[in-house]
Image: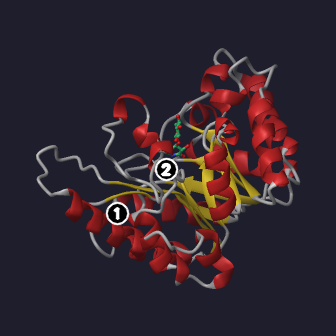
Amino acid sequence: PPNLPALKSVAPAPFGTAIKAMQIDDPDWVALARAQVCQLTPEWEMKMEYVLADGLDRPRFDRSDRIAAFAARNGMALHGHTLIWYSQGAEAFAGLSGAAFDRAFDGYVAAVAGRYRGKVRSWDVVNEPILDDGSGLRDCHWSARYGHDGYILRAFEQARAADPDAVLFLNEYNQESVPAKGIQFLKLVERLLKAGCPLQGLGLQSHLWIDIPEGAISTFMREAAQFGLPIHVSELDCTLRTENRLDLRGAGQRTALQTARVRELAEAFTALPAAQRFAFTVWGLRDTDSWYRQGDKDDGRDRPLPFDGAGRPGPMAAALAQGF
Ligand code: XIL
């Protein structure tokens, strides 16, 4: 489909992509991003793992500053990702306890959210708090001190204080594909709102795969929408791989399933009330930019993103354009 319209011009909300700072040095990526998106989410370099790699006292903001400057220069919105996550970064807190832990936790959220106040449109304040099987919330470094809901509440309150204008999101994956996880997500949102949490938006990461049953994606979108909060499809990709290594379906069948699921997602998002369509973000533009195509995960054939390695629109781009 070489004549597809720009995705940002057909999407019913700001259309975004994940960005790594090094992509700013790739003129092909920059041209594609300028043509297709109006919003950016740092893929890694705003996470604690990067920011605190040199320790709590020496936060690294060089790369996130670069991404923020690129966004501003190009008139693109910025979505912050992510302040508090069970994974990647808690190492910097090793050995802290009591009031020192509290100071470090609050101080981290204040420093990061404060630095980008006025520069970000929104934040993933807490990322992925729910267990993969949906049986409850994850134990992590943060829940060990504040409790499972407690660390989430604390993070949102700190983020609200540091940046009163950013829209604050809870971000999670597999709500559509693991029903128990979807239910757990909705229950958590309900509890947080009841507790007065300044939670203002729901992030549906949407790391899809081709075996998700038809209807699951649109059903969960409708359930999530019942809170009336803005919804961000925050990290869309759709791998062609399956768990079943003996899967004999050919490339054509896999692509057809990918098209169906991605189109279903785009249609379900478009069907939301306008005020709830916050943004729609893909987790990379070109297949070769995908985390599925890095290192030993890469079989060289997966096509999880809208554009091929040369920046030409592929089946997923067409599915999005049709679904919006
Ligand atoms: C991934 C990035 O794509 C990788 O580059 C990084 O090394 C690890 O994290 N859910 C999330 C994202 O919220 O932050 C993850 O991104 C993908 C799953």
Circle 2 residue: 310
Residue 34 screen position, x and y as percent: 69, 58
Where is 322 relative to 254, above or below? below
Where is 300 relative to 312, above or below? above
Residue 220 screen position, x and y as percent: 43, 71
CA–CA distance between discs 2 and 1?
A: 37 Å
Amino acid type indicated by mark 2? Ala
What residue lies at 64% left-to-right and 70% top-to-bottom?
8
Circle 1 residue: 179
* Within-10-Å neighbours for mark 1: few <14, some 14–19, many 20+: some
Q: Which residue is at the front of the view, 226 or 277?
A: 277
Q: Earlier in the sequence, mark 2 or mark 1?
A: 1
Query: Can residue 272 be seen at all in this image of the molecule?
Result: yes
Q: Which residue is at the front of the view, 140 or 13?
A: 13
What residue lies at 86% left-to-right and 57% top-to-bottom?
164
Q: How many numbered marks, from 0 up? A: 2
Query: Can residue 197 be seen at all in this image of the molecule?
Result: no
What residue lies at 72% left-to-right and 17% top-to-bottom?
54
What residue lies at 49% left-to-right and 50% top-to-bottom?
310
- Secondary structure beneath label 1: helix
Res 183 → quadrant: bottom left
Q: Is residue 33 left or right of residue 115?
A: left
